[in-house]
Amino acid sequence: MSNLPRPDDLAKRVHYEPPSKDWMDLPTDIKPGRYCYASNPASVEYVGLPNARPWNPLEEDWKLPENWQEIILNGMRERLDKYRTFKVFMDICVRCGACADKCHYFIGSGDPRNMPVLRAELLRSVYRGEFTKAGKILGRFAGARKLTLDVLKEWWYYFFQCSECRRCSVFCPYGIDTAEITILGRELLNLVGLNIDWIATPVANCYRTGNHLGIQPHAFKDMLEFFCDDIEEITGIRPEPSFNKKGVDILFVTPSGDVFADPGTYTCMGYLMLFEYLKREYGLEVTWSTYASEGGNFGFFTSHETMKRLNSKMYMEAERLGAKWILGGECGHMWRVINQYMDTLNGPDFQKGHMITPYNPITGTTFHNAASTKMVHIAEFTADLIKHGKLNLDKSRNSNICLTWHDSCNPARGMGLLEEPRYVARAVVDKFYDMPENTIREQTFCCGGGAGLNAGENDELRMMGGLPRANAVRYVHEKHGVNMLGCVCAIDRAVFPPLMEYWCPEVQVCGLHELVANALVFPGESERETDLRGEPLPGKEDE
Amino acid sequence: MKALYSLFLVFALVLIALLGAGAAGWQYAFGVVIPYVAAVVFVVGFCLRVVKWARSPVPFRIPTTCGQQKSLPWIPQAKIENPSSTGGVIVRMLLEILFFRSLFRNTKVEMYDGPKVRYTSSKWLWLGGLAFHYAFLVVFLRHMRLFTEPIPWPIGMLETLDTILQIGAPTLYMSDLVLVAAASYLFLRRVVVPQIRFISQAADYFPLFLILAIALSGISMRYFTKVSIIDVKVLTMGLVTFHPVIPDGIGPIFFVHLFLVSVLLVYFPLSKLMHMGGVFMSPTRNLANTNRAVRHVNPWKFENVHYHTYDEYEDEFREKMIEADLPVDKEGPESAEEGASNV
């Protein structure tokens, strides 16, 4: 956080009154702190995306292919034919403005081009100017413009200031989904090689090694065993996770963020402990895969095609190992992809038929809602275990925690996973307070770093985008003494700690299964002195 | 500026009708030819537009879920906001189309005390929009008495209800009042609220002015300038029975009204007014969230793309995997291809 202004100063810059000039006449000023670095050519090349070369957004020349206009316009034409959403959303917006103040980036920055309607209008104006008769004839009077280099740069700047959280869509009378528009916009930008590195390199890494940091299989295993050491030290119980093991009924896939960075690592320890408990108590085994070691799908921020290529690994691996179904960890975009795209993208090609509708032999529950994808969210899984009394839980170990719940955008708005995590959280924590209703459930706010925007260089954008979420957290912090923000998304767990540090420093961040693991009582475990973070448990502080 | 352009455009249209049907006396053109052409353009244009949308597939199922999913049997599902059945989708769509459900949720954001943000309920747009559309619908249906003989009883009923306050003579239609008030509100909002002014285009002002002008010309005929309603009915019945006649003595204001309506009909399929058809087509609202339970098939195929298979992965990392005691499919000495790529 180099040049980041102090919170009060940042907030003072926010004005919701737009300039009096017409937006088409406002130049696009690419500001450091609000954009991410350009993609590394090696990464772009590795996954075979077009126009790999070094380039810098601050320089005049973006080193585009000579016929870039033709490429983009052909790309638009093709996508208008392939996606009804694209066509309908280009045509029917009435600019009623209901979405205008719903975007967290607008609320936190006041930049008028962050109003979802206008962000979409950046693309719509070109659609009108290049694809509709009225726009071609009437030009600007019909809100149309031609695709110029300045327009392209404006697209790049603002489509990578949308975290595709879909909050605006909830309020739109026609359900126009700006995420869908920026997804397609980013696809178009990718056709001429305009990606950002915080997306392109994780994509290449996920493709090659299975996870976004490019950690190779042996190191991945080491990381998890390192967590097992910690768990043994804290609980006296040593988990023995299995890797790439054939013949195990359940394959577990989680975002690799949980394996590499605090506080996601504590959530990861939570998974390990839960699985160990189920193995010891009920003989249920779960295997991890080093090949499909990433749930979070960075391809989703690039193109539908890249999303498909990364996602294919989950089914391919389940097929190879002979797993009956897949259990998915706590992740945002991963679940958007699983719920809305996975079965359509890769079900027919890679799900060959040996998998069954997910069934938990411990509780006797069949997950009919996952009959086709064969994939269950771990919050559903754990909620079911708790409901059937299959876990021995000691809530008092979490009694120094006063929790509020962040509905991670994608599971909330793309899936409707709202009650399961709350049920689990309430079973393991006594003090639970929801944030104000305009800021939770389907109206939840993004962490500010979703859709591949959690880079270091765009910290100003992230702090602005995270302001609405942080503001609601601070409200419950001041009112109820909330000191922990729980979530089911690995990006959240990466983005929130610096965000809270900036706007609301007394609140820490955790995943759901960290809380579960803290409360989980193993038969024969040694008396715990600390929680998974190594901090003293309530009542143990003085010893 | 955009508002002014649009206003002038509507004035120009009024002038064209006044000069054409009044001064030049081209009543047949303005009373018969143009309305017929407009009706054909509207119907054909509307259908073509919807067909054009419908020809693009919906490859992925992307409903916006505004409530609890259907999952475990003991967790109550939000059956309407997050539907998993066709019935739920229909109710969701009805709430959206009849009551503007999503707009009802609308909030307004305010910043106070430096970095604090507050959201307050804001239902004015919902109310204004709802009033505008329902008043428009009532006015449209009321006009059916000009195109039918005998007049069906629901139209008569509607008219009775619309005049139930019995104010003035001829009795005041409440729908007229509501339509003008709501359209004015929608216009004022665009001019007064800075954010809305910023996003507004000529294409947003023009239809509002056009509809206001249609309403005002209609009101003027009924309450002030007066036209012979019998003659108007002769003309309209002639149009619908395809035996068009132009009775003498219909004032030019009627032709202004009719011309503006014709312009609206032609403009409709070319413009954002197509949200009337599009609202039914939006995949975020009209699909059930059964995404994991039922396979939803993409009608087109992705081009041939390369998938990074497990075999390729193991070939690259085999030695390291063996060393780390990770199971491999192919044991043996064949060495991993070092440095196949370094990203």
Image (cartoon, rainbow, N blue to C red):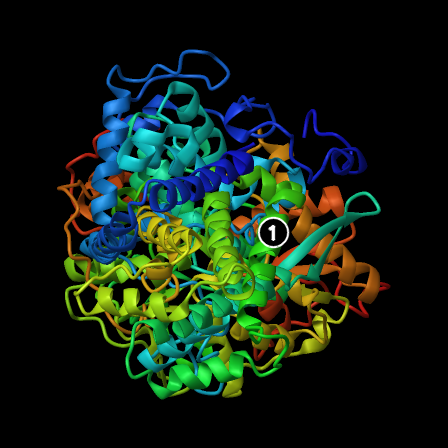
Residue B105 visible in the picture: no
Q: Quadrant of the N terminus of chain A?
A: top right
**A294 sits left or right of A461 in the view:** left
Kind of residue indicated by mark 1: Pro
Compared with A123, A319 (above or below) is below
Residue visible at 28% across and 26% down in the picture: A45
Q: Position of residue B260 (x, y in %)?
A: 39, 50
**B299 sits left or right of B139 in the view:** left
Q: Quadrant of the C terminus of chain A?
A: bottom right
Looking at the image, which residue sits at the far right? Answer: A542
Q: Nearest the camera: A156 or A322?
A: A156
Q: How many marks?
A: 1
The residue carrying mark 1 is A263
| Neighbours of disc 1 within 10 Å: few (<14), some (14-19), many (20+) | many
Q: Position of residue B180 (x, y in %)?
A: 57, 60
Q: Position of residue B208 (x, y in %)?
A: 50, 50
Q: Position of residue A70 (x, y in %)?
A: 23, 24
Q: Nearest the camera: A16 or B218?
A: B218
Rendering quarter of residue A400: bottom right
Q: Nearest the camera: B158 or B329?
A: B158
Residue visible at 55% across and 55% down in the picture: A229
Q: Nearest the camera: B15 or A246?
A: B15
Rendering quarter of residue A201: top left
Residue visible at 78% across and 35% down in the picture: A12
**B186 sits left or right of A165 in the view:** right
Residue A365 visible in the picture: yes
Compared with A58, A369 (above or below) is below
Q: Secondary structure at mark 1?
A: loop
**A217 sits left or right of B202 in the view:** left
